[in-house]
Amino acid sequence: MGASDEDTEQACSRWELIPLCEYRLPHAPTSTSARRRWLSLKRLLHRSEEEPAGPVKSEAELHALAPERLDALAGPLDWREAATALQQALEQRVISERAWVLIGPPASGYGDLLAAWAQQQGAIHIPSPGYEGLDGDDRRWFAAWPEQPDQRRPWTLPRLERCWLRHPAGLGLVRAFFERLLAGRLGFGLIGCDSWAWAYLRFVVPTAGVRVLTFQAFDGERLVGWLTSLASADHRRPRRFRHAQSGNLLLRANDDEPQESAGVELRYLAAQSRGNAAAALRLWRARLRSEPEEPDATEAVDLDKDADAATATTATERDGAEVIWVAPAVDLALPGGLDEPEALLLHALLLHDGLPPPILEALLPHARFQTQALLQQLAAVNVVTCDADAHWRVSVFAYPAVRAFLADRDFLTDAF
């Protein structure tokens, strides 16, 4: 087997397509979870103890990396591996199946994956109708499908969550879509859907005739292999990712020594991201740091703490390997005092994978000014963000806390 074949096989084993019911959440290391709970309790009780020895690298000594540097070390996410794994699974499908629905957790990017797969396979790409088309005439949208479906050339609808609204007038199109689909009038297709949207839609549309799938969670071992491949992609020089506080080696790429199995930090990253590869990548990228530039700098040199961030670079170890520092993980906690108005807003954002303000305002029982005020208050503490497409979304950093907050209030949650 050639090297490229081995790489493809490893990639497909990472992107393991499974029935939704078989998804297994990664568990946080017991010692790490207990330590973090103890620190939270200490902060709550205002207890102090003797300070431990200082970190190997303090936050003041390090700088965040420029986007192009981050891309060279960790990403951006390339969907070709997952698209190849998806195509291999599709080649084994039962010809009588009407559709496969690929469910992805928030910020998973599976809509982009299906768009990449459609381009790779020459499949028909069906865009979502846009919010203005959800409560009107749906004939123009259905005209995008071929009049005589060809089972050998599937279509893909990457974003089912954009085809409905939780509103009395917002379900007509998605119901008509499933009626046509299950009657065999659309041929075979691949549908992408956010996990929170699917948690709601499965109660209001007929879904018994479709196969519901997802990719298995990225646990610590999957993350090790994937992050190592990303760090090795465009570079031959050895790279070592070390924890800024302890100095412990977390990940190595292009190194003579083999990569160890996943340690505590990477297993915790898998649990923190709930197995969502795209979320784990964003959390990982946010933690990567460099030292200020210093001529002939090595690990043992005391670097100038006041050096300009624009000249930041990685240090080198004595054998010439690059060192990339990894800041400690941060668990974002929700501010106190959140109540029903915030819960309704956050739940609406998750059900629809983000919404623009006019649509969000129409779905909530609040006055327009109150919705705007809530968004700004939550944005100030990084609970929600406004993306380039003008959609407000729950931030990937706050998502675990938001999900727990909604679950505690008995709101409908997803399967992830």
Image (cartoon, helix red, strand yellow):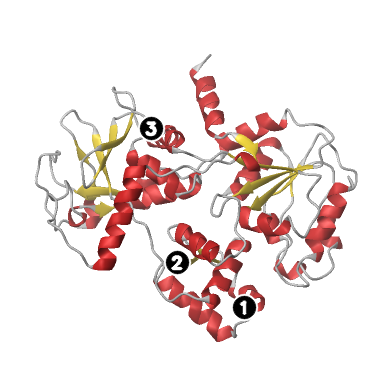
Q: Residue at x 9, y 46 (%)?
A: 302
Badge nearest the viewer, 3 or 2: 2
Apparent side of residue 167 relative to residue 350 in the rendered image (left or right): right
Residue 232 can be seen in this image:
yes
- Residue 198 is situated, as x and y percent measured from the top left of the image, at 68, 55
Q: Earlier in the sequence, mark 1 or mark 3?
A: 3
Q: Earlier in the sequence, mark 1 or mark 2?
A: 1
Residue type beneath disc 1:
Glu
- Residue 392 is situated, as x and y percent measured from the top left of the image, at 54, 68
Q: Residue at x 66, y 52 (%)?
A: 193
Report how far apart the C-alphas of labels 1 and 2 lie in the structure.
Answer: 18 Å
Report how far apart the C-alphas of labels 3 and 2 lie in the structure.
Answer: 33 Å
Apparent side of residue 67 relative to residue 362 in the rendered image (left or right): left
Kindly state the secondary structure of the residue where label 1 is placed: helix
Residue type beneath disc 3:
Ser
Residue type beneath disc 2:
Val
Mark 2 — residue? 383
Kindly state the secondary structure of the residue where label 3 is placed: helix
| Quarter of image, res 203 | bottom right
Apparent side of residue 334 relative to residue 197 in the rendered image (left or right): left
- Residue 381 is situated, as x and y percent measured from the top left of the image, at 39, 70
Mark 3 — residue? 232
Report how far apart the C-alphas of labels 1 and 3 lie in the structure.
Answer: 46 Å
Q: Residue furthest top?
A: 1
Residue 354 can be seen in this image:
no
Apparent side of residue 268 relative to residue 206 in the rendered image (left or right): left
- Residue 131 is situated, as x and y percent measured from the top left of the image, at 70, 68
Q: Are marks 1 and 3 in contact (CB under 8 Å)?
A: no
Badge nearest the viewer, 1 or 3: 1
Mark 1 — residue? 361
